[in-house]
Amino acid sequence: MSETTELSVIEIKPEQAPALYIPNGLESYFEHIKASVSEAPDLSTKKGRDRVASLAAQVSRSKTAVEKPGREYLKRLKEAVRPAEQEIKRFVDACDALRDETRRPLTEWEAEQERIAAEKAAEEERLRIEAEQAAAAEALKKQIEDGHELALLMNIQFDRDAADAQAEAERQRIAHEEEIKRQAAEQARIDAEENIKREREESAQREAALKLKAEQEEQAKIEVQQAAEREKKEAAEKVERDKKEAQERAEREKQEAIAEEQRKQQEAEQHRVAEEKRLKDEADKRAADVAHRKTIGTAVVNALTEHAGLTREQAIETLKALMDNKIPHTSIQY
């Protein structure tokens, strides 16, 4: 089984972040990682199982290499947004205060207009009462002219009644004016209370908005802290996993080295035993050949001394000549 090469080290620089950490911006990295681990190791062998574990570890390392700069980029974005949020809050508060201050003259003017309208209504009511009194006086004058004698007789009573009527009319006018003033004051009080209530509600809304904003900021801070804690935990877990993997890999390599050394020793021992056997066989073969040649040589020497009338020394010299192929057309068959 052929194995693909190890994943190349992924490095994302800060200036690349804006173009990468967008929807589907990391797809090419994922496809690269996916293609780099698209193997099918043989799980029936230890080597294949180790390869699967190594490929999975490669994916984890590549994931961290892409995720870590992304987290740092996200942190920078949140820090960049915080001044904008603070400036928006300052601007909104300043605009609210400016709005209230800008409308204050209008609010005061509206209250003054309500007061003037109330006084005008009171004056109109007073003029109406005076007109009614004048009409009553004119009618009374006509009656006096028509019945002068009767008027003279009833003059005292009439004067008394007229004075009472005028006093009653004056009392009613004063009471009406007081009622109009009271109503105007009551309306001004109601308007002032409504303005105060509206301002309180607006203030409560601003406070609620500020509270909500503070809670959101606190939540964002908590989320950032939680993310940092998760990253710290994941980093610690990764260090622990890498340490464990390194220990396991070192142990595997150690056992493999021991097995390899044992195999080499076994092969060396087998080679030594085979070499010893080969040397012994060759030595035995040479010894047997020497003994065979010696037997044949002895037979030849004995035959030469017995049948050719040669001395032993001559027979031995003749044997040497035969062995060295110095005598043509003759040879010794061993």
Image: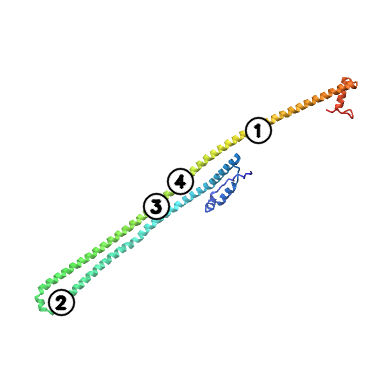
Q: Earlier in the sequence, mark 4 or mark 3?
A: 3
CA distance separating discs 2 and 1:
153 Å
Q: Earlier in the sequence, mark 1 or mark 4?
A: 4
Secondary element at tag 1: helix
Above or below residue 258? Residue 143 is: below
Residue assigned mark 4: 226
**Residue type (three-letter) at the residue carrying disc 2:** Lys
Mark 3 and mark 2 in contact (Cβ < 8 Å)?
no
Mark 2 or 4, closer to the camera: 4
**Residue type (three-letter) at the residue carrying disc 4:** Gln
Tell whether 320 sits left or right of 9: right
Q: Earlier in the sequence, mark 2 or mark 1?
A: 2
Mark 2 or 1, closer to the camera: 1
Above or below residue 166? Residue 202 is: above
Mark 3 and mark 1 in contact (Cβ < 8 Å)?
no
Secondary element at tag 4: helix
Q: Quadrant of the N terminus?
A: top right
CA distance separating discs 1 and 3:
75 Å
Residue assigned mark 1: 264
Secondary element at tag 2: helix
Closer to the camera in the image, 302 or 161: 302
Q: At 58% from the left edge and 36% from the top edge, which residue is drawn? A: 252
CA distance separating discs 4 and 3:
20 Å
Label 3 neighbourhood size at 10 Å, few (<14), some (14-19), many (20+)?
few
CA distance separating discs 1 and 4:
55 Å
**Residue type (three-letter) at the residue carrying disc 3:** Leu
Tell whether 328 sits left or right of 108: right
Residue 74 location in percent, x, y? 49, 50
CA distance separating discs 2 and 3:
79 Å
Residue 328 location in percent, x, y? 89, 29
Q: At 54% from the left edge and 38% from the top edge, which residue is drawn? A: 244
Residue 282 location in percent, x, y? 75, 28
